[in-house]
Image (cartoon, rainbow, N blue to C red):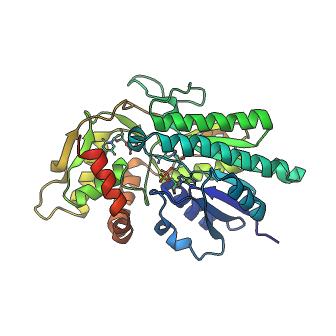
Amino acid sequence: MTQACIIVTGGAGFIGANFIHQWIATEPALSVINLDKLTYAGNPASLRAVESNPNYAFARADIGDFDTVCRLLAQRKPVAVVNFAAESHVDRSIHGPGEFVQTNIVGTFQLLEAVRSYWSALPNETRRQFRFLHVSTDEVYGSLQASDPPFTERSPYAPNSPYSASKAGSDHLVRAYHHTYGLPAITTNCSNNYGPYQFPEKLIPLVILNALAGKPLPVYGDGMNVRDWLYVGDHCTAIRLALSKGRPGEMYNIGGNNERTNIDVVRVICGILDELRPASDRKKHESLITYVADRPGHDRRYAIDATKSSDELGWKPTDTFESGIRKTVRWYLDNPDWVQGVVSGEYRKWVETNYSRR
Ligand code: NAD
Ligand code: TYD
């Protein structure tokens, strides 16, 4: 008999890898199959600790490859599919939007088609219990003014970057597959995550690693853009709860209630590093802060109202920004081998593309 399992797509990325670690530690009855294309953002080193666990298996594949995904579904017979796979970085979407349309929209469409074909042939009870969980972002709602209330699940979609537009497109497809075909799909829309295994193209790991290397800490524009930061472990818990308690066809907003300006985030990181790893010349890490040209179309503020997730799923974040950021800085200090494996060839090219002409 095949062991009962879920399929996770994009599990070699930042949130997917954290999710797999959490899943294996907490859900022993269901093994996890990680379907990942291994783009620049996919890193098998993030999964070293579970590689030989009997409850984990890896399949290298593209979510847009309908035949391969169908074969995997038929072989493994998952009770759920959790879709993390995506191109996820706003700055990259500005330099090259094509990949974002391809993976986030066309790829999600092909994945939905494969899942629909598998799901519709399941026996009644298994079909009823099956879940497709689509992991999305608060960025689909667009940008808030300082005095606006946070986004709820009823806020209109108003994406502003090629990244958020492509995620919005995928969310609409997921919604349509529920309404049209009855696919038991749930979408979660989460705010900015941070924590272990995040690729250093994103603000928090970039600042930690640049500060350790004595390099400039690039702050876009006036540094006053606001993000609602959530520790990645809390996001993973919310996804597990949405899988077990979420209602098919619904969206659930997930956020940390931790609104911070970018400059504040950078200063907090600098302060922790001054304490844990003082610079050799004893200069404060803050002296590395460098204001650079703003991101085109830069969203000013995101904020999430997670009341529905709290009421229906019983979810609450456990980490504050202070506890989560301290754990995160420590993790990067304690894992130099993982960092070394990441800041190699392709990463250097990206740094050149994004920062040399700012
Ligand atoms: P990431 O860029 O770190 O990882 C993406 C993973 O998807 C990588 O392992 C990559 O190899 C894989 N992948 C990319 N294209 C693929 C394809 N065509 N087929 C199969 N695998 C493919 O991303 P992340 O930060 O872990 O984000 C995961 C998901 O969560 C994304 O859907 C993202 O939109 C969403 N999200 C992220 C955040 C955040 O702050 N990082 C917040 C809210 C929502
Ligand atoms: P990022 O981590 O790219 O996430 P997102 O754009 O999805 O919110 O960026 C977080 C914030 O930090 C965003 O307002 C852009 C800003 N930022 C900088 O100021 N400097 C940087 O080098 C990067 C990568 C981001």
Residue sitting nearer the eye, 80 or 324: 80
Point 46% across, 33% down: residue = 303
Q: Quadrant of the N terminus?
A: bottom right
Q: Position of residue 105 (x, y in %)?
A: 59, 40
Which corner quadrant of the image does residue 54 belong to? bottom right
Seen in the picture, residue 36 relative to 165 is either above or below; the reply is below
Q: Is residue 170 visible?
A: yes
Point 37% across, 63% down: residue = 342
Residue sitting nearer the eye, 148 or 320: 148
Q: How many marks?
A: 0
Q: Position of residue 27 (x, y in %)?
A: 66, 64
Outermost right residue = 124
Q: Is residue 295 left or right of residue 135?
A: left
Q: Is residue 189 left or right of residue 281?
A: right
Q: Quadrant of the C terminus?
A: top left
Q: Is residue 314 visible?
A: no
Q: Position of residue 289 (x, y in %)?
A: 20, 46
Point 25% across, 33% down: residue = 222
Q: Position of residue 253 (x, y in %)?
A: 57, 38
Outermost left residue = 281
